[in-house]
Amino acid sequence: MLQFIRDNATGWIAWGIVILISIPFALWGIHQYVTPESSVAVATVDDTEIGYYDFQRLYARRRQQLQSILGAGLLDADDDSRLRREVLDGMIDAEVLVRSGIDAGMRVGDEQLANTIQTQEFFQSTDGFSPDAYEGWLRSQGYSSGGFEEELRRSLLEQQITLGIAGSDFVSAGGVHDAVRLRLQTRTISLLTIPASDFKVPEPTDSEIRTHFDRNRGEYTAPERVRLRYLEISLGEIASGIKADDEELRALFDAEPERFVTPEKRDVSHILLAVSPEADADDATHAEDRLKSLKDRILAGASFEDLARENSDDPGSAASGGALGFIERGMMVPEFEEAAFALAPAEVSDPVRTSYGWHLVKVLAVQESRNATFDEVRDQVLEQYQAREAERIYVERVETLANVTYEHPESLEAGARELGLEIRETEPLTRDGQSESHIAARPAVVAAAFSSDVLDEGNNSDPIEFEPGRIVVVRTFDHEPKRELELDEARAAIVIDLQSNARRKAASELGHSLLEDLRNGRDSEAVAADAEVEWSRFDNVSRTGGELAENLLEIAFRMPRPGTADAQFDGLLDDRGDFVIISLSSVDDGDAASLTDDETHRLRQALQDEIGRLMFDGFIRGRRQAADVRIIQQNPES
């Protein structure tokens, strides 16, 4: 998961974010605090040490940020180790960067430093920069003014070097043209899929099962699981349990009669001549003229209902003479509704244009808006009464639950007694949210269940609103660590894996054989007929085409251009074990002339950013290789 974030957060935007937040990071102490323990090192860059406590502070901050995004339970041991190394690599890169700037004679002057400090929001008062706020902040963070200012100089120097390298490239018009030619290029391809599931394979023998298990024992594991005990407060359950007599309900009804109004309703019919919103003006005008003619006939005495049956394009109402029944405001599209509610009974509208076409609207009857009687809306009044009372009780009970379970973190018993709740249990839950219990599988509950406070410390969780109006407090029990399965436990999975591997192998062998035939000039339709499958053709596929898997796109756009009459062929075994043969029949390059000036500008900027990032990465790699970097392994992993 962390690798995915690292791999994808490498563009110029990411570097911009790094630059923008580097000052606040410095303000909050990425590097050196005034501490007597800072001599413990996790790494050295030439003769400069990177302190253990500086590393731990930055690592803790990064971990907290990731947990707030991903959830507390979603960082496993491998992620944690990777995070530690990434933090350390970043600190080493920063040190290498600063030393490069110093060696090149770059400095941050006192005036620039003072201006940066004086504009930070941490140090502002109503009158601007406050020396007292500045000094107070330094004391609260354990800084001396000299130590803080030195660290801020480093941060500003890093920004200067980063911008100087990454922002120094220029992309010519020819470069933009080449980029458009490649990035907007489309290809016509066909796919021939050999499904692995079509192959019959034998049941593996006991010997094969044992051998496979011995060689791959570590792959067959039971995941870490916990079961949860929980207390739940449900707004819906509270509401359904609230009783009220007619006296209370009538008082609510009498206090707010305007809330219980029967809206105006109109019984309408229509004749629709369907016209697409994209239709040209002539088609739209023709439909409007037809409706005007129909209205003239109605005014002359023709039956609206008969004309609707003969002419309306609305299949739902034409057979019944155009009848739509009673409608209220908000039920129809605005243009239709405006016309219907402006007519008198028996009146027919002029032609009305909507997204469906042209309409003639007729109002058959009107039910005026009126205040409802208590008997008519009693159930509605009861629902509102229950909702109002339940909300008040819900808030009170949630607050009580939070206080009691916090004051008694070792058990749910006190909360259950205080609120008269039942302590319930879930089915087993894994870190990836697999559980037969609806509540346990919710992401917020998973995160809490596998958090350090709940899982390791054995405390109750904070209240978790896993659905609107449903709050739980959970605690773990019956914790099962991840473990390797015994052979008998893994047997069924091994059989599936062995048979799946056999099918994959069979599909691959046949696929490579057919691919070879195609490359040797055999007719593609004959090859498909032998395999009893059909080609699927995809025209004008782009590099970002969502209709094809990424691995297929990668191969399709890596294949050389086909000859005048010949196709190019390649293939791969996909994630399902199917062998997919790719036929490339044509390539069409992108055209820079098709872009607007704004699109061309954005593309040039994106290219400059990408080249700048690559230049910066190359610079860092080169400087790091030239430096004497030593990592003290046991300390970052502590």
Image: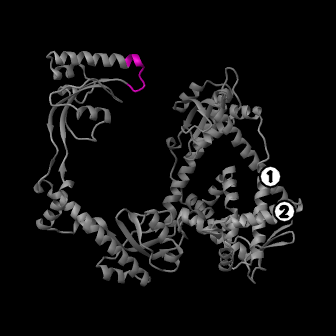
Q: Is residue 181 above or below residue 159?
A: above
Which callout, 1 or 2, points to the residue nearer the camera? 2
Q: Can residue 482 be seen in this view?
A: yes
> Which quadrant holds residue 69?
bottom right
Residue 243, image x and y in percent? 17, 69
Q: Residue 164 carries which label?
A: 1
Q: How many labels does the image show?
A: 2
Image location of residue 25, percent across then percent down: 68, 66
Q: Distance between the residues labelled 1 and 2?
A: 14 Å
Q: Does the magenta stretch include residue 278?
A: yes
User: Which residue bears the numbered disc 2?
Assistant: 107
Residue drawn where x is 22% and y is 19% of the image: 295
Rendered residue at 67%/61% (across/down): 21
Which x, y percent locates residue 265?
Answer: 18, 40
The answer to which of marks 1 and 2 sits earlier in the sequence is 2
Magenta highlight range? 276-283
Q: In which quarter of the image is the N terminus?
A: bottom right
Kind of residue sitting beneath label 1: Gly
**Picture coordinates of residue 142, whole percent (x, y):** 69, 80
Q: How crowded is mark 1: few (under 14 residues within 10 Å), some or many (20 or more)?
A: few
* Left or right placement of residue 119 versus residue 219 in this view: right
